[in-house]
Image (spheres, helix red, strand yellow):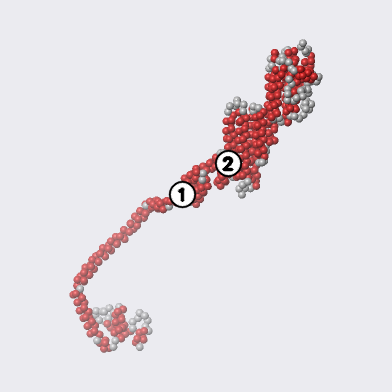
């Protein structure tokens, strides 16, 4: 029942018997320590013992104490060196712990100073540490940095070697890096140097447009210029045309060497032949190249308005080139030496214009006025020079040399029945009257006029018939005036008669029917001045009595 009661007690409280027993034992002197857990456990065990065991407990305790004392004595006797060593060690440990405590106290006192010095040292070496970290980072990424720093050198080498696509890729990579890291100055410098190489590439591509080249080379240059996006399509087309014009101008300028020795008869003909060949090849290349690059393959994003602008640039350029050719022709045609050169030049130009007809650039209709003017000026000049030479005949040079054949004389006499002699001549068109040979000035004049007509046969524009007939009539009228002003009329009577009744009808028929082969003399009447002069000569000849 006591155990049951003990089990029902609250934790931390002693059973009443144990408490009472502890109070009884506490009265003695010295007071034992009974509050420890072991003492409380021992008191609880004693209370549970029977009386006999309780009475025998002092003896048991005394016996146990003696045994413990003897065991302790034996231990001290047998293990005294250990105890001495333990005592010495304990003393040393105590001294060491005391010294350690003092050192630790000093250390704790020095820690704030050390911490302050460490902070100061850390702040002092912060820049060095930063430099070392940057150096370590550079060393770690040295291969990548080396590749980046080599971008401008590689781009320049690609530009010089003609690897334009690789150069553009390198410059684009440098631009991406600079845009990704805008605050890194090295990347900005690399981009600037790469852009410098691209500017050199731009200059090289524009120089390609100005140099002689074929379609593949020019198409490649324009393609790279489009990828660079430095020029809009209209400005790019204008730059292309400007470059090709410069190349063509250089080629045309090189043909100036053919004009060396301009005193040579065929110098201007050689120059013009080479000039036209160069112009034809250059303009044909320009038209086909521009059409293939800008009109047949325009960019996909080009608007219809811009496409119309591109199409309008080519006619403007070709018109300018054609104007230059026509201006050159106006200058050179008058300097060509003879009719064959003029004819060969017209043939060459006709072939050139015909070849351009397939490209919609046929300019054959512009050639006749130029050559008509040239033929008119050349033939009229030859007529005029022949009459000028005729006018320089000395006073004693009008006499006859020999006697004309009888049939020729009869022909001349029979021709005197005509009123003016302008529509009467020999029946054979290509054989001059034999009477002309008797008078050297008349023969020389006839030869000069026939030489002009023979040259005209190679190139005789139909529109010039009346103009050339007018020029011939004017020259013959001047020759008539020369005969009328001879100081000795009797000496020039025979020459004037042959001139009026043989030479004038013959050369007029030679121009109208022999060269042009169309109308007759009646259809192309002489000018009034020639008619008046011929009437004066006929009247003058008839008035002068014949020599015996």
Label 1 packing within 10 angstroms: few (<14), some (14-19), many (20+) = some
**Who's the residue at 67% across and 37% down the image?**
363
- Quarter-wise, where is residue 241 in the image? top right
Depth check: give the residue in front, 168 or 115. Answer: 168
Marks 2 and 1, the one that precedes in the sequence = 1
Indicate the position of residue 208 as horizontal and vertical percent values.
Answer: 55, 41
Q: What residue would you read off at disc 2? A: 214
Q: Is residue 398 visible to the viewer in this orientation of the structure?
A: no
Residue closest to the far top? 548
Camera sees residue 205 = yes
Q: Nearer the viewer, residue 331 or 124?
A: 331
At 62% from the left and 42% from the top, the residue drawn is 288
The count of marks equals 2
Quarter containing the C terminus: top right
| Left or right: 366, with 157 as reference point | right
Is 277 positioned to the left or the right of 534 in the image? left
Q: Quadrant of the N terminus?
A: bottom left
Label 2, residues with CA under 10 Å away: few <14, some 14-19, many ≥20: few
Q: Would you place residue 327 above or below residue 235 in this image?
A: above
Tell which of 191 and 87 is nearer to you: 191
Which residue is depicted at the point 35% across and 81% down?
A: 13
**Please, what secondary structure does the residue beneath circle 1 have?**
helix
**Quadrant assignment, res 218:** top right
| Viewer-proximal residue among 10 and 369 | 369
Residue linked to disc 1: 148
Tell me the residue at 21%/77% (across/down): 72
Q: Give residue 374's position: percent from left, percent from top.
A: 68, 29
Looking at the picture, how far across and down is residue 443, in whole percent?
A: 71, 19
- 2 or 1: mark nearer the eye: 2
**Residue at the extreme left:** 77
Snapshot quadrant of residue 65: bottom left
């Amino acid at each position: 029942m006591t155990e049951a009661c003990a089990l029902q007690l609250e934790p931390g409280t002693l059973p009443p018997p144990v408490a009472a027993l502890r109070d009884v034992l506490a009265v003695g002197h010295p007071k034992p320590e009974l509050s420890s857990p072991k003492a409380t456990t021992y008191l609880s065990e004693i209370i549970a013992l029977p009386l006999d065991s309780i009475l025998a407990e002092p003896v048991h305790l005394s016996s146990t104490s003696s045994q413990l004392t003897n065991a302790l004595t034996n231990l001290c006797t047998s293990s005294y060196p250990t105890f001495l060593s333990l005592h010495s060690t304990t003393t040393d440990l105590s001294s060491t712990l005391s010294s350690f405590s003092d050192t630790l106290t000093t250390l704790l006192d020095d820690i704030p100073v050390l911490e302050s010095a460490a902070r100061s040292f850390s702040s002092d070496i912060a820049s060095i540490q930063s430099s070392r970290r940057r150096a370590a980072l550079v060393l770690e990424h040295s291969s990548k940095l080396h590749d980046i720093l080599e971008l401008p050198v590689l781009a320049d080498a690609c530009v010089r070697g003609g690897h334009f696509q690789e150069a553009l890729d390198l410059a684009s990579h440098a631009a991406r890096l600079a845009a990704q890291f805008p605050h890194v100055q090295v990347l900005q410098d690399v981009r600037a140097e790469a852009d410098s190489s691209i500017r050199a590439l731009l200059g090289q591509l524009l120089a390609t447009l100005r140099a002689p080249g074929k379609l593949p080379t020019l198409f490649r240059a324009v393609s790279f210029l489009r990828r660079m996006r430095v020029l809009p399509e209209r400005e790019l087309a204008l730059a292309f045309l400007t470059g090709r014009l410069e190349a063509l101008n250089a080629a045309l300028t090189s043909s100036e060497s053919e004009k060396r020795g301009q005193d040579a008869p065929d110098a201007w003909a050689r120059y013009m032949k080479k000039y036209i060949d160069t112009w034809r090849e250059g303009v044909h290349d320009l038209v086909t190249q521009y059409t293939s690059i800008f009109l047949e393959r325009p960019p996909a994003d080009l608007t219809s308005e811009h496409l119309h602008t591109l199409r309008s640039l080519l006619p403007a350029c070709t018109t300018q080139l054609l104007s230059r050719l026509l201006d050159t022709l106006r200058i050179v045609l008058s300097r060509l030496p003879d009719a064959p050169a003029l004819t060969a030049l017209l043939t060459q130009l006709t072939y050139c214009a015909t070849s351009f007809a397939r490209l919609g650039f046929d300019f054959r209709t512009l050639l006749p006025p130029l050559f008509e003017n040239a033929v008119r000026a050349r033939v009229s000049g030859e007529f005029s020079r022949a009459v000028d030479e005729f006018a320089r005949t000395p006073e004693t040079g009008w006499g006859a040399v020999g006697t004309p054949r009888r049939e020729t004389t009869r022909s001349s006499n029979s021709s005197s029945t005509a009123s003016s002699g302008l529509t009467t001549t020999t029946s054979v068109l290509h054989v001059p009257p034999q009477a002309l040979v008797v008078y050297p000035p008349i023969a020389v004049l006839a030869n000069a006029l026939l030489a002009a007509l023979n040259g005209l046969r190679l190139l005789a524009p139909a529109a010039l018939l009346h103009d050339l007939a007018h020029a011939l009539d004017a020259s013959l009228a001047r020759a008539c005036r020369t005969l009328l002003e001879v100081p000795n009329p009797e000496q020039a009577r025979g020459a004037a008669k042959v001139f009026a009744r043989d030479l004038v009808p013959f050369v007029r028929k030679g121009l109208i029917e022999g060269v042009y082969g169309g109308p007759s003399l009646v259809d192309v009447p002489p000018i009034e001045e020639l008619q008046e002069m011929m009437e004066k000569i006929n009247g003058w000849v008839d008035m002068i009595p014949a020599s015996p």
